[in-house]
Image: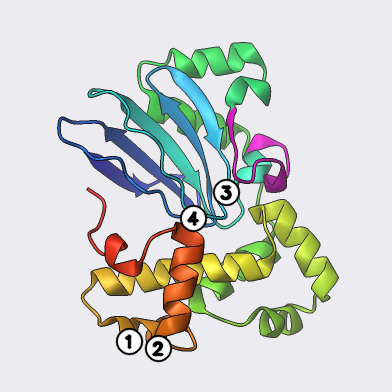
Amino acid sequence: MYRERASMLPHVVAWRSEVEPGDAPKRVLPDGCLDIIWQSGRVFVAGPDTVAQSPGRAPVGTRFFALRFGSGTGPGVLGLPASELTDRQVPLDALWPAPDVRRLAEAAEPLAALEAVAAARWRSPDRAMVALAEAARAGEAVGAFADRAGLSARHLQRRSIATFGYPPKTLHRIFRLQRAVALARDGESFGRVAADAGYADQAHLSREVRALTGVPLSSLVIPPV
């Protein structure tokens, strides 16, 4: 069982999940976000992924409550650059005072507790980086965005790595992958997916999907439960 909703915080999604009998392990695709996750009383941060992750199957009944921080909002809450968490899972008490994390771990309503703590630590995100995320989702070329935003390539690269955990071209690739998977799950032919998502051709689509997820697009068409 998986459910999500918009958080009270901008650019943040609140989600919850419980492992049920018969659930198969899910491939977690990179999405340009980082998450703070409560898992059966343990709290950790899942940093921004550059490739898909295949976590092992948790025991039946395992519960997850989490906040997913999009558009570069996570670093302000956590108090460190996203680049320090790229492709990593880190216990939250390695980043925050242990007593604060213990209160989260013991909360009767973990999702409400996570939102309250995140709200208390909230810092307004870098508006240029929010715009970069929007541009990447829309498929705007990185160079075109840099010109429009008045940022040098080097400056844009540095701020993107600190905000998202990777350079703007990687962010662009990840959001293009997200568009492709969504279109394929909506029933579009793979040739049409390639054109609509912004790939040069279907072969380019195939190479990129395998590079970022380790499997062909056909394996990703069935949406996660």
Q: Earlier in the sequence, mark 1 or mark 3?
A: 3
Find out whether the residues at labels 2 and 1 contact each other: C-beta distance under 8 Å: yes
Q: Earlier in the sequence, mark 3 or mark 2?
A: 3
As drawn, the label of residue 195 is 2
Q: Amino acid at mark 4?
A: Pro
User: Can you give x and y, in whole percent of width and height, for residue 153 in the image?
Assistant: 80, 74
Find out whether the residues at labels 2 and 4 contact each other: C-beta distance under 8 Å: no
Q: Amino acid at mark 3?
A: Pro
Left of 63 or right of it: where is 105? right
Dot 3, how many residues are within 10 Å of its Cα: few (below 14), some (14-19), or many (20+)?
many
Q: Earlier in the sequence, mark 4 or mark 1?
A: 4
Q: Dot 1: what SS?
A: helix
The residue singled out by tag 4 in the image is: 30
For marks 2 and 1, give the CA distance. Answer: 7 Å
For marks 4 and 3, give the CA distance. Answer: 7 Å
User: Can you give x and y, in whole percent of width and height, for residue 107 in the image?
Assistant: 42, 16
